[in-house]
Amino acid sequence: MKLVILESYVMEPGDLDWSGLRALVPDVTEYVRTPYDQIAQRIGDAELVVLNKCRMDEEILSKCPNLRWVGIIATGTDNLDLEACRRHGVSVANVPAYSTYSVAQMAFSLLLAICQCPERQDKALRDGYWQLEIPAGYGILPQVELYGKTFGVCGYGNIGRQTARLARAFGMEVLVWTRTVRPEYAQDGVTFVDLDTLLAKSDIVSLHCPATPVTRGLVNGEALAKMKPGAILLNTARGALVDEAAVAQALTSGHLGYYAADAFAVEPLPADSPLRTAPRTLFTPHVAWATGGALKRLMEITARNLETFLAGAGENIVNR
């Protein structure tokens, strides 16, 4: 039995602990940064592969006849053709909920940085300024109190639900737009509304949807026009949810108050992206999921997924 690990990003040594996988399958080959045209070659005759951000489609699968299991070290399966994997008898296991707390935390890290600018305040203090003496060049915005504001959550999976909990802890009213309202949500203290109502009433809109044919381009020019003037838009989910050119235009016109994001339509964010020159933005390089606690959880669940597959069942299979 052979396992191939196709990492698609470079992290600090030791950030991802593969020891749990190596204990299950001693024959392991690991690659960093695998482009599409090398995926099939690197998988070769392996039966097992662990990957993230690497495309898995009919062309790849047809060249890897021994492949039986794909472990994606992520929750989203956007890059995998699940139906093609099913046709080829390849089980795909994801890692649900490992980053719930970290991503929700990042949403609020971005929001709090907008509302009170602590890093800019710190720099100004260290440069010798105090309170109202701080020059405008530091880009410090008027401080915003979150208590009493309306917080809109688009998508109410694990991360959206945790983000709503944090919003309520800050004393905000929470509106939620989601495809399915489950009975267990009744005790959450949130109000379920349609998307137009959420956009019109929310002071802050936070995106937590998967990228599907229904949600791609969800926040376009029409949606932005329905938002409150000066509203804050947060995206720690998927870049494909947002029409980035429309967001840049709404920022430039002044209708959108602020845009903060950890995910982008094309990653890394291109040098010519209109977002780079738009005013009132705050960006992080898709790292919300990468806290130490989340990475530990990610590796533990991935190892468990493989262990249960080898035992004949398989946990978190998304294409049964």
Image: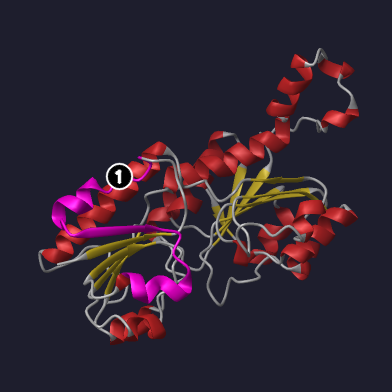
- Check disc 1 and report the residue beneath it: 17
Q: Residue 244's x, y, as percent?
A: 72, 63
Looking at the rendered structure, the kind of residue marked 1 is Asp
| Chain part drawn in magenta | 14-42
Is there any visible trace of residue 235 in the rendered image?
yes
Judging depth in this view, the residue of 219 and 274 nearest the camera is 274
Q: What residue appears at the point 71 percent right and 67 percent down from the top-left corner?
A: 243
* 44 sits left or right of 107 in the view: left
Quarter of image, res 48: bottom left
Residue plotted at (34% across, 70% down): 42
In the rendered image, the quadrant that contains the C terminus is bottom left
Q: Is 202 left or right of 257, judged from the image as shown? A: left
The magenta stretch spans residue 30: yes
Q: How many marks?
A: 1
Q: Position of 209 compared to 2: left or right?
A: right
**In the image, is residue 293 above or below residue 20?**
above
Q: Nearer the viewer, residue 229 or 193?
A: 229
Side (left or right) of 165 relative to 268 = left
